[in-house]
Amino acid sequence: MEKPSLASSSHVQPQQFGSAQNIAKASARRSRLPGRFARLPELAGPGFLPLGLFARLPLAMLTVGTLTLVTSVSQSYAIGGMAAGAVGIGSAVGAPVLGSLADRAGQRVVLLVAAVVNTLAVAGLLAAAYVTPGYESALAATGVLVAAFLAGASCPQVGPMARVRWMALTTRNLLPARAPQSVGAPQPTNAPDSVGVPFPVSGSRSVAANRADLDTALSYEGTADEITFVLGPALVGVLASLLAPWLPLALAALMTITLVPAFAVHPSHHAVVPPAPKAGTGVVSSEKGGRQRSRRAGAVVAVPVAAMVCMGTFFGATQNALSAYAAQYATAELAGLLYSVMGLSSAVAALSVAFWPQRFGLAARWVAAALAMSMLSLLLLVPAGIWPMVFVLLLLGIPVGPVMVTVFSIGGLVAPAGRMATVMTALASGIVAGTALGAYFAGQLAETQGPAAAFLVSMAAAAGLLVLGLVTSVVMKRRPRA
């Protein structure tokens, strides 16, 4: 019997169950992952987890790959840094635009177009880097800088789009379901449909159960981000040093044109349905109220976006400060390995959020983790060697992952209706913009006053996260409970 397809509408249709075989297969799939994470393949369908992980890897490779290529070709650290900065600025500008388009037109078409445009932009960057006749000044490298900006602006935002899908998949399970149409068929509480996406057949899952699913999914997403942003630069370094400086960007373009379209057309995209156009009646009378609600929503969303700017500032400052620190005690090339130590503990801690008790609310999580992050960041001034710093970074990474997971969760909670992708991409852009700010300020301080002064930027960013967490705690208390 042919299985029904998933309808792209404001609600979804349950599968007609004809035998217990499907339930057995679902249980087998569920047992392959430990604990709560076994639920994720059920929710999103087969193949979504590896696709969502590796399709975001090109974004993690793009900035470092551009820096490596342009520096190698131009023999200028300044121009290489400008090209990498152009990628970051392009990503910070383009990501919210892609998110807004996805909210209006759907993720599939936006991701497919972005994959093609980005592949062409990266190819243009490779060509511009090698055909530019000279790199005597930034003006001579204008073509490279423009191509780098376009590559950053068009890079598909797989991570934010995946988070939007998780939020839609968990929220959708609250919809009441119809009874199965097959006579004598088993009556599972939550069985998968033809693409592996479960829909309740009798009754609906509780708010607490869906909150647990969302916590688990966002914990996984935080870990996936950490893994890719550690693996991406490492992969660039290996390929560029052992083979050729152009190879990392060529591989990133190949992955973009193959993996991103596969992610775009994955059946889970049906869960995210663009809002239907509103009727024209009552538009004039409600225009003022709509503007007021929009302003209030924008003010609330600005808090998690500002938090992500602080988070990016912490990342960028720590990276640059570690470069100066490593050069002082060994060699600057160790900075990447030192930074990956913090990423490792951050990724593990992000996974742990799935098992935190539900009564530990989002705002309280933010404040507690940011407080720990602020206190532990003071330890950056203590070590006087490589191995003591490794220990400090392992400790410091523990609250970082939970803060990121929590901020993304709150961003999804306060996002206006129909603007989820816009908010998620704005949060991701905040990290990119903050990383550039942190790298700049820490770099200036490291060059003039040493790594200890550069670490002060990291401490200030962590303190900013704590302040914004306290603000969020007040705002969340004033919001009506859903």
Image (spheres, rainbow, N blue to C red):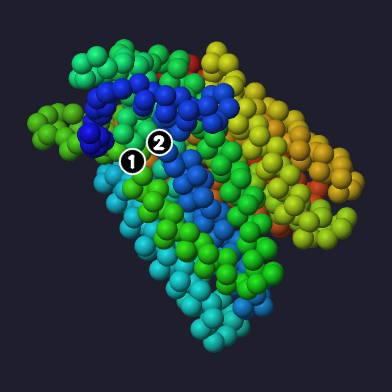
Q: Quadrant of the N terminus?
A: top left
Vertical order, 155 against 172 (above or below): below
Give residue 258's position: percent from left, percent from top. 42, 58
Residue named by callout 2: 45
Question: For this rendering, which residue is in front, 305 or 24?
Answer: 24
Q: Is residue 153 visible from the viewing direction of this image?
A: no
Residue 248 is situated, as x and y percent measured from the top left of the image, at 58, 65
Tell me if mark 1 has few (under 14), some (14-19) or many (20+) residues whose alpha carbon lies within 10 angstroms of its own.
many
Residue type at mark 2 is: Gly
Q: Is residue 141 above or below residue 455?
A: below
Q: Are marks 1 and 2 in contact (CB under 8 Å)?
A: yes
Q: Quadrant of the C terminus?
A: top left
Amino acid type for the residue under numbered disc 1: Pro
Residue at 59 percent of width and 21 percent of height: 355
Q: Position of residue 140 (x, y in %)?
A: 53, 81
Instruction: Give x and y (percent) for residue 257.
Output: 41, 60
Asked if one can make out residue 252 in the rendered structure from this viewpoint, the answer is yes
Between the C-alphas of marks 1 and 2, the distance is: 8 Å
Q: Residues within 10 Å of mark 2 (few under 14, many from 20)?
A: many
Residue located at (38% from left, 41% from top):
421
Vertical relation: 81 (above or below) 471: below
Specify the quadrant of the image occupied by residue 353: top right
Give the secondary structure at mark 2: loop
The residue under label 1 is 267
Q: Is residue 1 left or right of residue 57?
A: left
Name the one closer to the observer, 245 or 178.
178
Residue drawn where x is 31% and y is 14% of the image:
187
* Residue for point 66% across, 34% down: 348
